[in-house]
Image: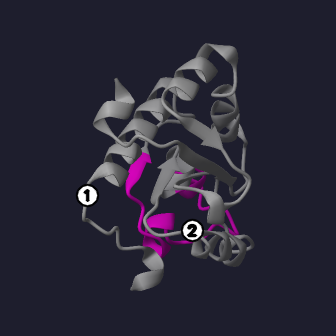
Amino acid sequence: MFASRARQRSLSVYHLHMGGSNGDALEWRALLAPRYEAKLKGMGVSFVTSAEDADIVAVTGLLTRGNLDAVLAELSSMPSPSVLIAAGDCAINGGSWAKLEMPGLEPYPLSHYADVHITVPGSPPLPQALIEALVAAANILAQPGERLTGWQDS
């Protein structure tokens, strides 16, 4: 199964919602439902309450001028190695809000400021796609001898 291919210890996941319509955040919350919880538990996934305790940080929502500093401060506390996932069109590129040229929206996507390792498109992304992203993140972390370069290293 998953643990034999990736790594044997548990994976700590932190969800950082930047704000917005909350559709993407609700899909992350859906992972706590019994339908998905057993699968995640079998994969060794646990959810933590801070980026500094996480192996994987999943970011959802809109990056705005108002939350940019707070988001970057939270991401700067990620340990190394860790994996950053941008989940949902809003987190990846501003989604439909970017097309509307919403005032206050940050003109650059999150990947301009941080080293995003995995993107999960969708508005909102399906829980199955989010689980696949966690598997991909675990496989990245399981690669021996490679240090992931973080955005704070540049």
Secondary structure of the residue carrying tag 2 is loop
User: Residue 23: x and y, percent?
Assistant: 68, 36
Q: Secondary structure at mark 1?
A: loop
Can you name the residue that lies furthest to the front here? 8
Could you tell me how far apart the alpha carbons at marks 1 and 2 are, in whole angstroms? Answer: 19 Å
- Vertical position of residue 129 compared to residue 100: above or below: above
Residue drawn at the location 55% of the way across and 57% of the way down: 98
Residue extending furthest toward the bottom:
154
Where is 31 relative to 86, above or below?
above
Circle 1 Cα neighbour tier, 10 Å, few/some/many (<14 / 14–19 / ≥20): few
Q: Nearer the viewer, residue 13 or 97?
A: 13
Q: Is residue 79 left or right of residue 140?
A: right
- Examine the image and state in which quarter residue 72 appears: bottom right
Q: Quadrant of the C terminus?
A: bottom left
Q: Amino acid at mark 1?
A: Pro
The residue under label 1 is: 144
Which residue is pictured at 51% across the width and 24% down the height?
Answer: 42
Which x, y percent locates residue 90? Answer: 56, 50
Residue 136 x/y as whole percent: 35, 41
Can residue 34 be spotted in the picture? yes
Near-viewer residue (29 or 93): 29
Which-is-in-front pick, marks 1 and 2? 1
Classify mark 2: residues with Cα within 10 Å, few (<14), some (14-19) or many (20+). Answer: many
Please say whether residue 90 is one of the residues in the magenta stretch.
Answer: no
Instruction: Say whether residue 112 is magenta.
Output: yes
* Label pair 1/2, CB-CB below 8 angstroms: no
The structure's colour scheme is: one colour
Q: In percent of the image, x 63 and y 51: which residue is there?
A: 14
Span shown in magenta: 94-119
In the picture of the structure, the residue carrying the numbered disc 2 is 78
Q: What's the amino acid at mark 2?
A: Met
